[in-house]
Amino acid sequence: MTTPAKRVGLLYDPIVLSHQPPAYHPERPARVREAMAALERSGLLDRLTRLPVTPAAREQLERVHTRAYLDFVQEVVAEGGGVLDRGDTVASPGSWGAAIAAAGAAVGAVDAVMAGDVDAAFALVRPPGHHALSDRAMGFCLLNNAAVAASHAAAAHGLSRVLLVDFDVHHGNGTQDIFYDNGHVLYFSTHQYPAYPGTGRVEETGFGAGAGYTVNVPLPPDVGDAGFLEAFDTVLRPLADRFRPEMVLVSAGYDAHWRNSAYVAGIHERATVTGFAALSARLRDIADAHCPGQLVGILEGGYDLESLAYGVLATLRVWLGDAEVDDPIGPPPGSLPALDLTDLLAQVRRVHGLAPDG
Ligand SMILES: [Zn+2]
């Protein structure tokens, strides 16, 4: 059976290249520039619907970030840039324009799928967002693009059940924190643990009206594609079937790929491009089952240029309906250890009231 072809939108504005951390920094403009070049070379760009990017409005940002924090970032940028958070999150003179374009692209992706212009949309943006807190920059992130998109889906489109899936190898502490007491956004994250930023334990499940709406799967190192897929199949899918999302938002980070160990300290999950394709297919299937056409991807991490580009291509090909996806990089050298995730996943299921073996 072949999946019918879908219309997939791409939101990309070269202004996101104007956020320029120092030359040594792994979160560099070449990340998205090279991904765009790969889209062009492969011919995939011709099959995507290019959608316009409008910078996020202050009102859209203030649903997530404090006024004082937004003023602070703008001031640092106006003064020519500087350190925003302990040295690893840095602003340059072009950072504000890039950041509001990134958040605006995420908002535009939500608007495009809600309007029915496309069946799915992907915001190819930087700086990334999922570590950014309401009042603080963190982990290369200035504005929390995915959180701005999710809150826009609720405020502007009246959605009350948004599923936000984060497969970046790092825990999206900012996104978790922003929606921790919110039952309208179900935040699901697979991430290496322990690792930066140190959050994302199973026991972090939400608070107040948000109790039960934060779902963390803290994976040990070296799980490979199989670990992520097992988490998606045994936790995410039944969770999504219970939640019945009206939109699936994806914090799509490609730094679980095995080549990122060379760029990001302590990261060692050894996933592949083929694995990203399979995760993207699971997400498409969840959207197809509950909210056809309401699927939005937003780029987060991924620091090895080639695996990032092929990862993005894999997601887009799968969402377009292609059955086959190229993985020119292939699997990691050596073999993966035999890890048994049964107990961990059973614990997550138990904590979240999912049947033991459903
Ligand atoms: Zn990451």
Image: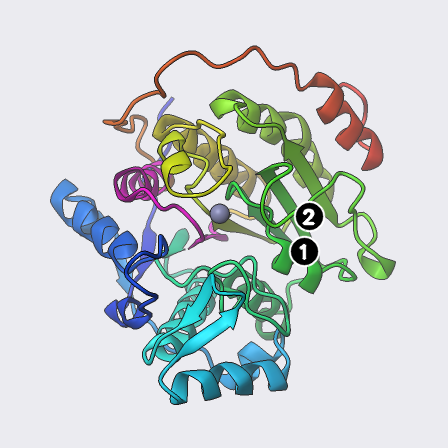
Q: Is residue 16 visible?
A: yes
Q: Which residue is painted at 47% across and 68% down in the image?
A: 107
Q: Quadrant of the C terminus?
A: top right
Q: Quadrant of the N terminus?
A: top left
- Dot 2 crowding, Cα within 10 Å, few <14, some 14–19, many 20+: some
Return the residue nearer the eye: 349 or 160: 349
Residue type, numbered disc 1: Gln
- Pointers 2 and 1 in contact (C-beta within 8 Å): yes
- Location of residue 139 in the rendering, given as x and y in whole percent from the top left corner: 52, 58
Return the residue nearer the eye: 46 or 103: 103
Residue on which disc 1 sits: 176
Q: Which residue is painted at 52% across and 23% down in the image?
A: 222
- Location of residue 241 in the rendering, given as x and y in whole percent from the top left corner: 68, 37
Q: Please, is residue 166 above or below residue 90 in the view? A: above
Please give the label number shown on residue 199.
2
- The stretch in magenta equals 293-318
Mark 2 vs ligand 1: CB below 8 Å: no
Left/right of residue 90 with respect to residue 331 in the rendered view = right
